[in-house]
Structure formats: structure tokens, C-alpha cells
């Protein structure tokens, strides 16, 4: 066990390292690691871990499965039970020690993700939402236009958006009383959601850039969806003509010059549907010589 407090660290059986102000700390038999207020630490046999304001980083691929958990004193523990060759790794800021025994491998996350339509009553915290948004903005983005804009809707905004969607659904109902009931039901359902986001993009005058920005924003949405699954939340993406409805746009608060691409409902899953059968990638792939 190693613990660093007040900028110093002592490792059992190893040297004392001090990195306040950004000096170098060297582990026995390992390369140099620097922590100058958010730089990079690289461990022998392991990937790069980023430290940003005391974030959590894990090195299950490192020597002996080194795991660092940021707490009030930033402690590091060596976990000999982790296989240095096969365990996944997690990077970046977290909300504290991960309650799960293992971090989730990115391939596991991709294959296990589902669209979640039923949520528990547990609220989604502001910190959780910010964590997901930080994952979203790491998406590839040609020219670094950063076109994405995120809107976190509170209960009133969710209800107003639901009313706009319900009004569109209500148009298909002939009986006026029943149509009003549809509007109220959809509005109430949205208001009761644990959390809801809208994702928009800025509209560039250049059609080529606009197309690239559209693609980048959807990669950001995928990042967010996978990150939600990785921290135990469920996400349900929704698109459609309602995104251009003036009432929906007003509910979200998007200005002129932005286009809403999707809304994302978030929460702790109350149930998880079975995955649908998909065609093998091999069936859809052409190898060109």
C-alpha cells in the first residue's frame, strides 16, 4: 500500500517520491512518472493515465495490476489479484472509487449496452451528467469545430418538451378529449424522467463542415451512451421530426443557428431488455485489395 498526503509518497519496499510542483517520481524498475498538476503517468507495461484534479485512474495492465483510487488523500494500492495482461483499464475523472470490483472493458460495454426505456426513481446527479458530457466531447472532430451543444432539461423543460411531442401525437387522435389526454400523458411522462438531455449542433455555413459536424456530434452521442452504461446508467436516444418543432425548440432553449439532433433520456435501469440479433460484421464487410 502506498499513500501520498501533502505531496509526498512512500512506497513499501521502495523509495520515497515527492511530486509537489511537478518533480519526477521513479518507481523501482519502472520508467519516470510526472504529476505536474495534471500531466501523464506511464507505468511499466501499462497505458497512459491522466490525472486531472485528483481524478481516478486505473492501471490493470500495469505491473501487478496497479490500481490508483483518488480519495481525500489520493491512495494507491497494488492489487496482485488482477491479471496484468487481460484486465481492462479505465481512464479519466470519476466520481470516486468505482463500486464495481472491476472496470468494464470497452468491448464489454459496447456489446452490453441497451436502449433503456424504464428507469428507477433514483435521480441522476449533476456530477454524473457532467461526467457523461466530458466523455461526449472526447469524440473525434475534424477541424476541432466542437459543434456540439448540450442542454440539460429540468422538470419544467421536460414537461414542455413532452407537451410539444404529445401535441404531435394527439393530432392523430380524433376525439378531442382523448387527444388532450395524450398530450397530458406524454408531458407527465417526460416530466417524471430522472434526467433528459438534448444534443444540438451549430450550423456552419460551409456544407462540408456541416456534414462533418453532424457526424462528429453522433460520435459524441455514442460516447455518452457508452459512458452511461459503464457507470451503471441507462440511456434512450430519440430522434424525429419533433426536433424541428418550434414548441420543442422553445422548450429546449436552442437559439437560431443550432439544430437539435437527439434527446437522451437517462436514469438507473429498472429493467434491461434482451439484445436483438444482429448480422455479423463479416457479412457486411468487403475487403478491397
Image (cartoon, rainbow, N blue to C red):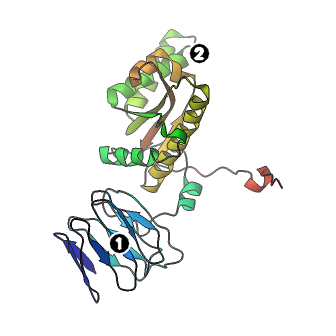
* Residue shown at 56% from the left, 33% from the top: 214
* Residue shown at 59% from the left, 15% from the top: 172
* Residue shown at 46% from the left, 56% from the top: 230
Q: CA distance from mark 1 to mark 2?
A: 64 Å
x and y, in percent, of residue 179 in the image: 51, 15
Q: Dot 2: few (<14), some (14–19), or many (≥20) neighbours within 10 Å?
A: few
Kindly state the secondary structure of the residue where label 2 is placed.
Answer: loop
Where, quadrant-wise, is the C terminus in this rendering?
A: bottom right
- Horizontal side of residue 116 vs 99, given as left or right: right
Q: Visible in this render: residue 184?
A: no
Question: Which residue in the protein does label 1 denote?
Answer: 33
Q: Nearer the viewer, residue 69 or 137?
A: 137
x and y, in percent, of residue 229 in the image: 47, 52
Q: Is residue 44 above or below residue 173?
A: below
Q: Visible in this render: residue 123?
A: yes
Kindly state the secondary structure of the residue where label 1 is placed.
Answer: strand
Question: Which residue in the protein does label 2 denote?
Answer: 172
x and y, in percent, of residue 124 in the image: 35, 44
Amino acid at each position: 500500500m502506498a499513500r501520498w498526503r501533502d505531496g509526498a509518497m512512500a512506497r513499501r519496499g521502495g523509495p520515497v517520491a515527492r511530486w509537489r510542483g511537478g518533480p519526477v517520481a521513479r518507481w523501482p524498475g519502472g520508467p519516470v512518472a510526472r504529476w505536474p498538476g495534471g500531466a501523464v503517468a506511464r507505468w511499466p507495461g501499462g497505458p497512459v493515465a491522466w490525472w486531472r484534479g485528483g481524478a481516478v485512474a486505473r492501471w490493470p495492465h500495469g505491473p501487478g495490476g496497479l490500481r490508483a483510487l483518488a480519495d481525500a488523500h489520493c491512495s494507491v494500492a497494488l492489487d496482485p489479484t488482477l491479471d496484468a495482461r487481460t484486465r481492462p483499464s479505465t481512464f479519466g475523472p470519476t466520481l470516486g472509487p468505482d463500486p464495481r470490483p472491476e472496470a468494464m472493458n470497452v468491448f464489454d460495454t459496447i456489446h452490453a449496452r441497451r436502449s433503456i426505456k424504464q428507469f428507477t426513481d433514483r435521480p441522476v446527479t449533476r456530477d454524473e451528467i457532467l461526467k457523461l458530457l466530458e466523455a461526449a466531447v472526447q469524440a473525434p472532430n475534424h477541424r476541432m469545430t466542437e459543434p456540439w451543444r448540450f442542454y440539460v432539461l429540468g422538470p419544467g423543460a421536460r414537461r414542455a418538451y413532452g407537451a410539444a411531442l404529445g401535441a404531435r401525437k394527439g393530432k392523430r387522435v380524433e376525439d378531442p378529449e382523448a387527444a388532450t389526454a395524450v398530450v397530458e400523458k406524454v408531458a407527465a411522462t417526460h416530466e417524471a424522467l430522472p434526467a433528459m438531455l438534448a444534443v444540438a449542433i451549430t450550423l456552419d455555413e460551409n456544407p462540408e463542415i456541416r456534414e462533418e459536424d453532424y457526424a462528429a456530434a453522433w460520435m459524441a452521442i455514442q460516447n455518452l451512451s457508452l459512458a452511461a452504461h459503464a457507470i451503471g446508467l441507462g440511456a434512450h436516444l430519440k430522434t424525429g421530426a419533433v426536433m424541428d418543432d418550434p414548441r420543442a425548440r422553445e422548450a429546449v432553449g436552442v437559439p437560431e443557428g443550432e439544430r437539435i439532433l437527439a434527446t437522451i433520456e437517462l436514469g438507473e435501469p429498472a429493467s434491461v431488455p434482451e439484445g436483438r440479433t444482429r448480422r455479423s460484421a463479416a457479412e457486411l464487410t468487403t475487403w478491397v485489395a
